[in-house]
Image (cartoon, rainbow, N blue to C red):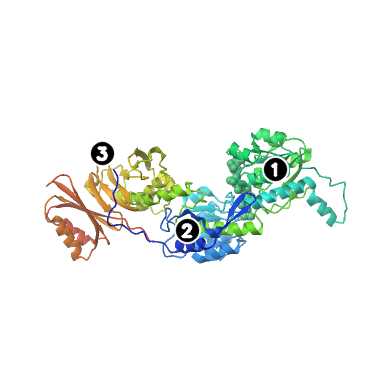
Amino acid sequence: MQCSAAASLTTPVARQAAPRMQQRLAGAGGALQVAGVRVAHRRAGRAAALGRPASMSVVAVASEAAKPTILVAEKLGAGGVDMLKEVGTVDCSYDLSKEDLLAKISLVDAIVIRSATKVTREVFEASKGRLKVVGRAGVGIDNVDLAAASEVGCLVVNAPTANTVAAAEHGIALLCALARNVAQADSAMKAGRWERSKWVGVSMVGKTLAIMGFGKVGSEVARRARGLGMTVVAYDPYASAEKAAALGVTIVSFDEALSRGDFFSLHMPLTPNTKGMFNDEAFGKMKKGARIVNVARGGVIDDDSLVRALDSGVVAGAALDVFEIEPPAADNPLVGRPDVICTPHLGASTKEAQEEVAYEIAEAVISALNGELTPSCVNAPMMAPEVLKELQPYTQLADGLGRAAVQLVEGSGFDDVFITYHSPRGDDLDTRLLRAMVVKGILEQITTSQVNLVNADLLAKKRGLRITETVVPADGDSVLNEIEVSIGTNKARFSSAVDKSGRITVAGCVKSGAPFLTKIGTFDIDLGIEGEVVLVRQTDQPGIIAAVSSELATNKINISFMSVAREAKGTQAIMAIGVDEAPSAAVMRAITDITGIQEVAVFSEKRAA
Ligand SMILES: NC(=O)C1=CN([C@@H]2O[C@H](COP(=O)(O)OP(=O)(O)OC[C@H]3O[C@@H](n4cnc5c(N)ncnc54)[C@H](O)[C@@H]3O)[C@@H](O)[C@H]2O)C=CC1
Ligand SMILES: O=C(O)C(=O)COP(=O)(O)O
């Protein structure tokens, strides 16, 4: 089926902060080209650029009225702090002890961190459900327990692009310093020694640099190393060989990279897969005299293995910006060695990068607090902005259908939900967001947990709910013609909501941007999904519509929509009436008592403020 435009439409309630931010963000602009990397001015506003309407709220994390409290737990650029202050109460408390963080966390809606703050499961538990957003002002999110965040429905966003160049420049700085013993020679001079022959270096031109992890930073290091006349190979199981070739880089296997590199530069994230990947075995495959730079994460190198590789001369020198424990312990076996140079996690620390990171993260946190699925959300389905934009009108429909269907169930004894999408896109329809919204609509009515896009699937699974999705190819040129939600029980509060297969079924569509209910059970109806809905089953006979309307009017209950459907003339009919406020039990009884009426039910499509 295809929906046609309705005369009466709902108007989404625009939130306060988003339009203000978007106005402000749209005010300044420009893009800066830095060595081939587009560093967008955050003030120009990615959110504004996406053209997402202010009303899009797919995660529902912030209340409309309340001003959020945002804890900035590590030094953040002033511009970003100012942006946060425009939408919330900002508490800048740096260097909190673990105990202080645990005490504060239940008082805040969002926390902004860098690499030093560990947001562990204990922190999420201590927040008692208040913490909605973790903003990582940088790339690596290994200091955030993502599984725990997802379980409690907390969005984790990062700032993935603003420090790329800074990290790459630091990698190159360390590479040059390592090749030419800059740090050691400087220390010697400061100690009064003029040691020219001791600190003879090695040249970089013509040598092979093996980049391990060919993402944003790795690519920028490659670009710069090519400029130094180096041959660059890269190991990255997920990188595109064409993209690498365009930069003059050859993608090779892990072992080939190990055997070819004169220099190594590490740029992969710390994950269970990469932890300790530079171990005895890996060092054993390197050429004698290799040099290694680590601006990624301490944990990707096994420290004891590196000590052994340095002792045996396999590795001639290492430059480390990152450590498994930061700051490293006094007895760290690497820091004091003359063949190891160290910096205290300075990769992202340029004035320019920190300003940009602050804007990038402030924008992401504000957008997440508004319930938007920001592109830098790391624990929710990733979707291209254009896909998000086109699905936006259907998210409210999916949510509304889930709510309607579950409220028609008598009790809560069901364990499966079928979702059917009638879409001209067929199998190309990305249903992840829609499924999550249906599940959210259902679960919000039956659990006390905060449900959002991040944890909807997880909570459904925990509750033993099986979700089955089917996409039925349909005609037309819209994204989606109809969504049908069917719950596996025939125990209904309104018996006509049960379809021929014995399941409680509702369906709906979007008309001119607004969600409509088009089917309840086997009856076709046409009702805007908003406010309260009164369902009435009656004998198809004259006078009933007037009697019900009159009863509502007498009790000053305003009707916003009304739709009547019948099986056949003179048999059964149902009326679906949209009303601005829920009728009292007395009004419901009075309607039930009208001659010819068989059953009455009410459900609510009102969302929590
Ligand atoms: N020292 C510092 O201050 C900074 C450190 N970093 C670190 O650098 C890392 C990289 O940052 P970006 O390039 O922005 O991230 P990115 O996500 O653009 O790149 C990471 C790359 O590593 C690859 N990768 C994943 N698993 C791998 C494996 N097992 N072996 C080899 N490659 C693998 C990915 O495919 C991806 O291409 C971050 O995760 C962060 O830990 C980033 C910025 C500053
Ligand atoms: O962005 C990253 O991954 C970094 O490592 C930068 O860390 P920082 O924000 O400087 O503590």
The quadrant holding residue 1 is top left
Q: Residues within 10 Å of mark 3 (few under 14, many from 20)?
A: few
Question: What distance separates the C-alpha of mark 1 from that of mark 2?
Answer: 42 Å
Q: Are marks 1 and 3 in contact (CB under 8 Å)?
A: no
**Which one is earlier in the sequence, the residue at label 3 or at label 2?**
2
The type of residue carrying mark 2 is Leu
| Residue 185 against residue 101 in the figure, above or below | above
Mark 2 and ligand 2: say if the CB distance to the nearest ligand atom is below 8 Å: no
Residue 342 as seen in the image, left or right of residue 93: right
Q: Which residue is mark 1?
A: 226
Q: Nearer the viewer, residue 470 or 100?
A: 470
Residue 125 as seen in the image, left or right of residue 593: right
Question: What distance separates the C-alpha of mark 3 from that of mark 2?
Answer: 41 Å
Q: Secondary structure at mark 2?
A: helix
Residue 340, horizontal then vertical, whole percent: 76, 47
Q: Which residue is mark 2?
A: 369
Q: Residue at x 70, y 54 (%)?
A: 344
